[in-house]
Structure formats: C-alpha cells, structure tokens
Amino acid sequence: MMLIDFLEQSISSNEKDAEEAGKISKTSHSVLEISNTNLKELKELMEQITDAMMQLNEILIANGADELLQKINMVIEKGLFITAETSANMEDVLVGAEETTDRINNIVGNLQAQMQSIEQIQESIAAVAGVVDNNSAIAQETAAISEEQKAQAESLVHLLNKLHI
C-alpha cells in the first residue's frame, strides 16, 4: 500500500509539474511573439536608417541638414530601445526554457522512481504469487494426506468392527 501511495503522490506531482511547464511554455511563447514583432520593427527601423543615411549623404553633399540628422537620431534611439527590450525579452525566454528543462528533468526523475516502484510491486506480487502457489501445493498435499488418513481410519474402523464380532 505504501508503494501505491507513493505512486499516487508521484503521479500527482508529475501532473502539477506538467501543468506548470505548460504555463511556462505559454508564457515563453508569448514573449517570443513579442520579441519577433520587435525584431520585425527593428528591421524596418534599420531599413529606415539606411534610407535616411542615403538621403543624408545626398543632402550633406548639397548643403548640410540638421533636421535630417535629428530624424536619424530619433530612429536610431528607437531602434536601440527596441533592441534593449528584445534582449530583455530573450532573457525571459531563456529563464523560462531553463525552468521548463528543470521541470521536465524532475518529471523524468519522478517517472524513473515510479518505474522502480512498479518493479518492486511486481516483485512483491511475484513473491506473493509464489507463496500462494506454495500454499496451494501444501494444501493439495495436505488434502491428499487427509484422504489417505481417512481411508486408513475407515480401514481401522472396519478392522475393529471385525474384532468385536
């Protein structure tokens, strides 16, 4: 019964770990979606920077332009902000992935313990079956001896009855 209780607790623990791993995975997926969106925006910003730089070169060659330089600086600052945010999101993803891996390793360890418990239960059942088989053989042997003793007792009773006559 203790092994069965252990299996029940272990299975319950595995269920909780699996649910938590699922939640972590969903959170990681959401963070990845945000990061993907941010990276797409960053790519667009970098393309805008490239276009602005080409324009700046043309304008600077012609007559210098402070306004365009300010626009480029704003785009670059926005790109840097998005890059920093994406980097932070990726850190969250890594932490989530590590936690998920730890939980999966825990589940694997629990499953291994369950398998050992199941093997112990099977060995116990085999031992009980062996005892039952042995008891059954002894019972059959006892029944056979009882039958033989009954036959001998009947024979003795029959002989005693002949002696009284």
Image (cartoon, helix red, strand yellow):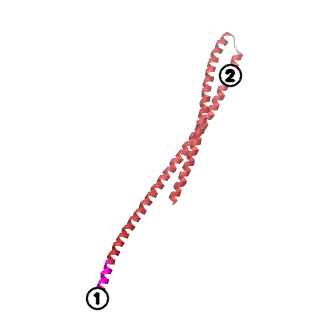
Left or right placement of residue 63 versus residue 90 in this view? right
Query: Nearest the camera: 72 or 106?
Result: 106
- Is residue 99 in sight in this rendering? no
- Is residue 150 in sight in this rendering? yes
The tag on residue 163 is 1
The magenta stretch is 151-159
* Element under disc 1: helix
Which residue is located at x 53 percent, y 54 percent? Answer: 8
Q: What residue is pinned by disc 2? A: 73
Between disc 2 and disc 1, the foreground one is 1
The CA span between labels 2 and 1 is: 132 Å
- Main SS of residues in magenta: helix
Amino acid under label 1?
Leu
Which residue is located at x 69 percent, y 17 percent? Answer: 68
Magenta stretch holds residue 152:
yes
Left or right placement of residue 114 versus residue 83 in this view? left
Q: Is residue 39 above or below residue 91?
A: above
Magenta stretch holds residue 51:
no
Give the x, y percent position of residue 30.
60, 36
Quadrant of the frame with the C terminus: bottom left
